[in-house]
Image (tube, helix red, strand yellow):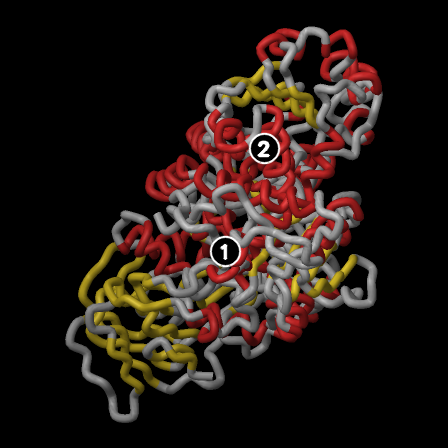
Amino acid sequence: MADPGTGRMSPTAPMELLVRGGTVVDRTGSRRSDVRVVEGTVVEVAEGLEAAPGATVLDAGGCVVSPGFVDLHTHLREPGREEAETIDSGTRAAALGGFTAVVAMPNTEPALDSAESVRNVHALAQGAMAHVAVAGAITVGRAGERLAPMAELAALGVRIFTDDGDGVQSAGLMRRALQYAMDLDVTLAQHCEDKSLSGGGVMHEGAWSSRLGLPGQPSEAEEVMVARDIALARATGGRVHFLHLSTAGSVELVRRARAEGVPVTAEVAPHHFTLTDACACGFDPVFKVNPPLRTDADVAAVKAALADGTADAIATDHAPHAPELKDLPFDEAPPGMLGLQTALALAVTELALPIEHIVALLSWQPAAIARLDGASGGTQGGDVAPGRPANLAVVDPVATWVVDPAALASRSRNTPYGGRTLTGQVRHTVLMGEPVVIDAEAQR
Amino acid sequence: MLSSAKCWAGDLVSAFPKHLLAMDDLDAGAIGEVLRVTDSFAEVGRRANPKVPTLRGRTVATLFFEDSTRTRMSFETAAKRMSADVLSFAAGSSAVKKGESLRDTIETIQAIGMDAVIIRHRSSGVPARVASWVEGCAVINAGDGWHQHPTQALLDLYTVRQSLGGGDEGLARFAGLRVTIVGDIRHSRVARSQITAYAALGADVTLVAPSTLLPPSLEGWPVASVSHDLDKVLATSDVVSLLRLQAERGSGEYVPTMREYTAGYALTARRALELPPEAVILHPGPMIRGVEIASEVAELPSARITDQVGNGVAVRMAVLFLLLGQPASLEHMSEPPDSEPIGGPAPEGGPRG
Ligand SMILES: [Zn+2]
């Protein structure tokens, strides 16, 4: 399929599905409603609906029924690192996390920098448990030297481009990429890290890196690239999406740019609003991530950004790594942590925000940035209303559960939250009318 | 907040710890104990047959992923003088196979059955990780990355205590002692251990370095002051501890040239004259004469660099004893030594605990 966001009923969806007893939350507000889905499309949203004979009924008592979640930042690792994750295992994790679409990052092996590689992922993602939207690379091989064939990728439905894993180091090339992206009406997403400042830094540079004798990445390594790209977005008019903002300074730069009307958007990863650089004290690489875990003040700042609209989305930066790689010394281990199955619960547990605000950050706001929303011809993040594609997340906002790394659907185990008790659980996930998750169990 | 980890310097240890990973593992009481036990083992070292049965039947492994013949020999000599069986795994040897993960190597060693593993690694934190993987086996950090090198700091303390008169009186004189640490503190595991060690005993620590060679943050460090002018602090330094500057850091990346570094931060003969008469000069080695320290300064009686090397074995024996020694062997320690070729050392008054 050319565009994974286009509407099509799942072949395994039941004819009729009734989501009963929940509170529907979407952009229009919240109301007590049942939701009737027929052949993958929402047909009725009202209280007291009766199930037709043979219909599948999902109990949503005490739950919020929202448009399915959209992850702007997922590393599915296929092709190239299938021992860590596959499209199959990664989208199962996504479904269990309430996501009905993920944006697959292009730092696979090979990188997603050609029409052939994008077609390959689209083919592998047929029948996956969540829609897979591909982010294309900005530069060939993500090497930061020559522009990738962005028009060819855009023709295949790619709407967002990034060299994630690295930032585009050359300001000149980034400026040209933005000009070219405007012609194609696509968005560039930046992993902000100036390598001349981050150097070999393996954690946040500060009190903890100094004590532990580990090379650090200063906050400025992120902030100078945020500032640079704001200037470039302002000058060119091209859209820049900031991936995983982690510092108080970055957040403030974006806040001012948005007030000024510069076309920038931003996401925050759950680990950046839940964990700090103090977690590195035992040298366990499960806490190594890039951008690194920052300070208490940064955690407070990114939380404030999510609260006041400076940040548009919670994005997981789900980054699976095989266990043996996380047994390496801290400085040698690859950065990254799992995120898909814990994102909603971490948001509920750690953000003092109403559930309506949290699902906005997880659903329709990221869907719009990814251009997977109805306005862009996609199926994601739309209102729960008759005629709409049935992509739904059903969330129990008060249920508690304990994170068991071994029980996660990912092929990898690198969650920093093992043993934590979290509040907020994804109960059911509906993908184009198919209940892919029922009672927190994957159905295939 | 989910983090709120309390791992730094945290709660003071009362008993001797299970592992020696960082100087933070030892409080003033534990440091005093190490130094007192070191006195006993130094005495053993002066015997014709410097061997005791203290660790007979115990197995100690040295696991050096980074070359350091000097430190490895010091530990192995210490273990052998205590009659332990010593297994040596060196980087590049067949025992540490290429491609075998650190964890596999440790599991192999654990399967063989070790009482202690002594680890040197180029990466900070490896001894701490290993300590989290092993059971019933003491881990001793013999230097990890820029992080810690606790036995080096302990032997510096021992050397200074000797020059302060030795024994508990020498130990008491650390209170208010003015210690100046000069050089590449940013990249130094020795400095990180020294600072904690001196401060634990009540010394006032001054760091002297160009800003580019200081750690990015000194928040929470037990440091009395920081200076970028060595000449101003010499007259008030009771101990000057010099650190090595690697040539690549003195060639434009951190300081413009070695010449500028030497001009500002080397202990030259002229600067040595500014020190108080009783001052002690230390260098963890290997020294680069003419860069951090002038040759003639290294030869001064106040430079206790060879003492540092000699004391290394006794300090490491003490650490092995305190980590592995059974209570029963404490009794044995206090038996007077005689002409037997193998016997326990006799500390004055015996180790306290
Ligand atoms: Zn990234």
Question: Mark 2 — on which chain does it sit?
Answer: B
Above or below, comparing residue A343 to residue A243 in the picture: below
A74 relative to B57 in the view: left or right: left
Q: Extreme bottom residue here?
A: A54
Q: Secondary structure at mark 2?
A: helix
**Can residue A225 be seen in this snapshot?**
no
Three-letter code, disc 1: Leu
Identify the residue shown where x is 43% and y is 75%: A432
**Can residue B16 be seen in this snapshot?**
yes
Above or below, comparing residue B66 to residue B85 in the picture: above
Identify the residue shown where x is 46% and y is 69%: A405
Quadrant placement of the N terminus of chain A: bottom right
Q: Extreme front residue here?
A: B339
Q: Which residue is mark 2?
A: B157
* Mark-to-mark CA distance, 2 and 1: 23 Å
Most foreground residue, B285 or A387: B285
Residue A389, image x, y percentages: 40, 70
Mark 2 is surrounded, within 10 Å at the Cα level, by few (under 14), some (14 to 19) or many (20 or more) other residues, namely many
Quadrant of the image occupied by residue A236: top right
A86 relative to A71 in the view: left or right: right
Question: Mark 1 — on which chain does it sit?
Answer: B
Which circle's residue, 2 or 1, is located before the other in the chain? 2
Residue B343, image x, y percentages: 63, 57
Q: Which residue is mark 1?
A: B330
